[in-house]
Image (cartoon, grey):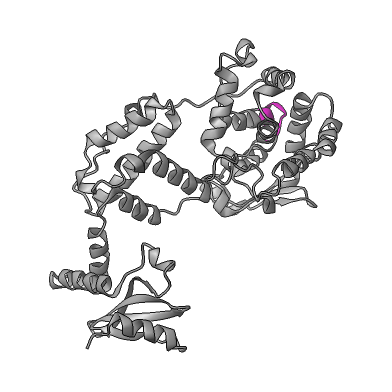
Amino acid sequence: MNMTEEQIINRLTTDSEHKMFAVASNLYLKPKGNGKANWVLRAQVNGKRLERVIGAFSINAETQQSKQHLTLNDAVQKLDGVRSECQKGFHPVLAVVNNEKRNIKTVDELFARFTESKAYSQSTQQMHDRVYHRDVSPRIGRFATQQITLREIEDVLAAIRKDDKPTVTQAALRIMKGMFGYAAAHKIVEYNVCENLTMKDAGHAIADAGMALADYEIERFFSVLNSYPEIVNEVHKISYVLLLTLGLRKMELFAATWDQVDWNAQVFNLAKVDVKTSQPVAVPIPVSVMPLFERLHLLANGSDYLFPAAPHKPIDKHLSASASNYVLRMILTSDKSPMKHVAIPYFTIHDLRRTFRTMLTGLDVEFDVAEACLNHKLNAKARRYDRHNRFAARKRAHAMVADIIVPMAFPDGITAINELQLAA
């Protein structure tokens, strides 16, 4: 005899042993405590007992909002779908998977499943979430996956392109190609509607290899920033110095929290989840750069982040990639900016990382040390046998670059920062 939802709630409320119990034929609940439990499919195949979690259940109103939450009726319907698959000859576990895939109705649900299937770094996942939810989901997120044609994809790209966001347009196309490729491979849709699209279809030529600034161009850039402090705030100026001296990827810096800064050891720690290559690394902070971290700490005003988002951006907790890109673009191209009248080539935030790497070559830093400063992966054989982190050599390399960059950015010396600190 099947249990009722009232009986289930009573059982979860009074049972302190947290033992799995039967709710219906092949359907069980496995308590987790605090009124929470998992729905479990249990079946016997060729004399072996098989179990598979098919959803969650909770008596708490807050956790009932979770996408994984299933009512008793939901769980029974899901079980019926699994039984239908089993009648076609599917193994029960495969039947659960196939039934779950058939339950993906909308593009938003497809994105969630696609994301779960990938082991992206935290920064990459944050970028995908940001681009999808801001630029893709509002346009096609509620559409049924079967409804999406090439026309809808092109409309999304055209709308983003209209906002003059070339890198976001390309990122959106990569995400949609991945999503619908996953959907086609798992028979959620018949074919990948983005299959034949290339980056040129995003409306922009494939990005070139970028550029690196020469020393005199860096000096001109900071000279203008120092002469016209009103064109950029202090936080962004400090960010350019840190990107040039530490060689970090922009979101490794902008999404960083203060617990990553080891003040005593003068080290900036990047965990595995923070890094594109999934390689944790301790980045040595040059002595001349430490006062910039102290200044940032004051400017952060109690935030957990080195670069907190502006107060009017409640959605973002830290400075976003698009905001930093926009600020630099306005500095370099706005008709009102004095930078437009200076002989400095147009460059991007990521070009500062390329500039750092080029400066290391100019300073005769050994290739493997320079690559380690960027936290680039060695080839497979080298990674297998060479486990040295080259910390001492990296520390010297970062210091040499800082000795060039910091005086350009702060020609009056490091004491100017200390005076700002006292005045804050």
Query: Whole-percent x and y of residue 32?
Result: 45, 78
Q: Is residue 321 left or right of residue 242?
A: left
Query: Whole-percent x and y of residue 371?
Result: 62, 39
- Say above or below: 399 vs 258: above
Query: Whole-percent x and y of residue 12?
Result: 40, 83
Q: Is residue 168 left or right of residue 181?
A: right
- Say above or below: 310 vs 339: below
Q: Quadrant of residue 42?
A: bottom left
Front one among 110 and 8? 8
Q: Residue at x 59, y 15 (%)?
A: 336
Q: Residue furthest left?
A: 88
Q: Residue at x 70, y 49 (%)?
A: 302
- In the image, the segment drawn in magenta is 359-366
Q: Is residue 125 visible?
A: yes
Q: Residue at x 55, y 17 (%)?
A: 333
Front one among 98 and 329? 329
- Say above or below: 386 vs 365: below
Residue 214 lies within the magenta run: no
